[in-house]
Structures are given as structure tokens and as C-alpha cells.
Amino acid sequence: MTRRQWKQVVATPFAAWAALALGIGLTCGYALMGASPFKPAIALAIAACQAAVSAIVFMRLDRASALVRFAAVSGVLWLSFLFILSFCDYLSRAYPP
Amino acid sequence: MSQTGVTVREPWPDARREETGLQFAMWVFLATEVLFFGALICTYAVNRWAHPAAVREAGRHAAFAYGLANTVILTLSGLSMAIADRAVKEQLGALAKACLWITLALGTAFVVIKALEYYKDISDNLWPGPDFALRGAGARPFWSFYWVATGVHAIHLTIGLGVVARLLVFAHRGSLVRRVPSMTISTLYWEFVDIVWLFLFALIYLVGRT
């Protein structure tokens, strides 16, 4: 294995995994701290960062074509519509009854 | 048809276009999966918004140690799968094969730990049936979400194990390094299953921690 291959094949994924492990540590540490504010939001924000690292490095979106990147973002885009429209409804009426 | 050592299938004119086409198709499939799991998570969000205290209380009963162990295992399997993918592209067949075996072992460990966790949950009457152990308006929807989301995720992971086993068959036949597109789309699937778990971990196992 050449030096370039070592960096490309092993070192870069390990660096990404270290970021994921750091995320796990942060999210657990914050969740286990006493009465900290915005726990679910922070846990989900860290999960979103971990998902981005995984998508970019492990799933190779960093080297993907524009078409592939567009397809990758489309799911998140439509999901955002689902959440926006759902909560437009729930937040604008008295619930739970 | 073969081009630069990579098997190209009909109707693709070359390996690069085949890989891009299959990547595109896989990402479109994964977008539908995002909406599938996203719809489940939306029901969770509505329940969490309507009954925050009951959901926190229900979340306290989730087996945090099992969840954390599975999170570490799954991220490690994502690492080994990513290395296998890159190794195939660099024609490093032996490394790819070793990493696929590691992925298979870690994935199997995940399923075993999940089964142990399910056994504990059922023993604790956390199945939202007639003998459900918890009270509170949001507890049943929380645990219904738990069983559906983690169950469907475990099915996805089990399918992933089959996909990895198929790649190992190629590796044992010595044809894995010529099957770059198969390796690429299998990696996309496996990593997606990992990503889903990261969100499930945050929503299920961390929500009731103090």
C-alpha cells in the first residue's frame, strides 16, 4: 500500500470515525448532565452533524457528481416539507384536545 | 464487458457512467427511505410535543447501555465498510475482504445485542399491549415508536448483512475488485442504516436521561 493509498483508504475514514465517536461522547455527556436546556435539540443537532460526516466521507458525497448530490439532498428537502406542513397544522390549533 | 479491470454491465457504456447511474438510483431509493423513517420520526415529534413529560418518563425505561453499545458498534461497522469500499476502488482486495468480514461481525453483534435488549424490554412489560407497564398519555406512542422504528431498522440491518455476505462471496471468488459499482451501492445502503440509528439513538435512548 502506498502512502497515498494509506491516507485515502485508511486514514481519512478513521478521522471521520473519530469525529463520529466525538459526537457520541458529546451527545451522551450532554444528555447525562443534570437539567441542561435544549437536550433533544442538541442531541438531534449532533446526530445531524454525524450524518453529514458519514454522508460526505463514508458515502463519498465529497466526490459525487452534482446529479448524485442533488438526489441525496432531495430526501432531506421533502422531509423538511413533511415536518413544516405537519407542524403548521399541529401548532396552529388546540392540541392535545 | 470489461474496462480497466472493472466489469461493466449493459446498458452502460463505461464504468464511470455505470457507477454514477447506480449511485443516483441508490440515492433516490435512500431518499424514499428518508421519508419512510422521517414520517415515523414526525409521529414521534408530535407525541413529544403533545406529551413532553410522559415521553421523558417513558424514555427513562429505554436500555441506555444496549443503545450506546449498538451505536458504537454500528459506527465502527460504518468505518470498516467505508474502508472496504475505498480498498476495492484501489484494487486492495485482501484489505477489502478483511473489512467486509469485520462489518459482517459487527452487524451480527448489533442484531444479537438488539435481541437481548428486546428480551429485556419484553420482560419489563414495555410492549404496549394489555400488560404495558407505563402510565401517561405519551408512553404508549413512545414505545410503539420504539418497537416499530427499531424493528424496521433491524430488518434493514439484516438485509444489509445479506448484502455484505454477497460481497464476501464475490471476494472469495476473487471478483470483488472488479465489482466497484456493487461495492459502492452496498456501502451507501449500509451507511444509511448507520445514520438512521444515530437519530434513533438520540430520540429513544437519550430523551429520558438526566
Image: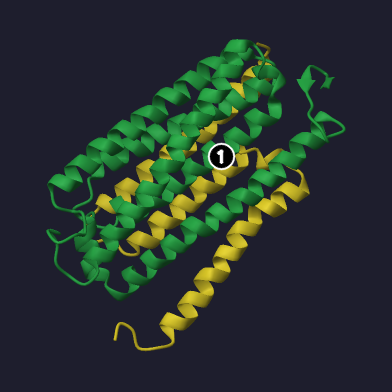
Q: Quadrant of residue B187?
A: top right
Along the viewing direction, whichever of B72 and B158 lies nearer the viewer: B158
Residue at 63% x, 36% y is B185
Q: Which residue is mark 1?
A: B189
Check the image and report above or below for B76 versus B202: above
Check the image and report above or below for B107 versus B57: above
Check the image and report above or below for B53 versus A27: below
| Chain yellow in the figure, letter | A
Residue at 53% x, 30% y is B163
| Chain green in the figure, letter | B
Circle 1 crowding by C-alpha within 10 Å: few under 14, some 14–19, many from 20: many
Visible in this render: residue A49? yes
* Residue A82 picture location, percent across and down: 53, 69
Q: Quadrant of residue A5?
A: top right
The colour scheme used here is: by chain
Check the image and report above or below for A27 versus B91: below
Q: Quadrant of residue B54?
A: bottom left
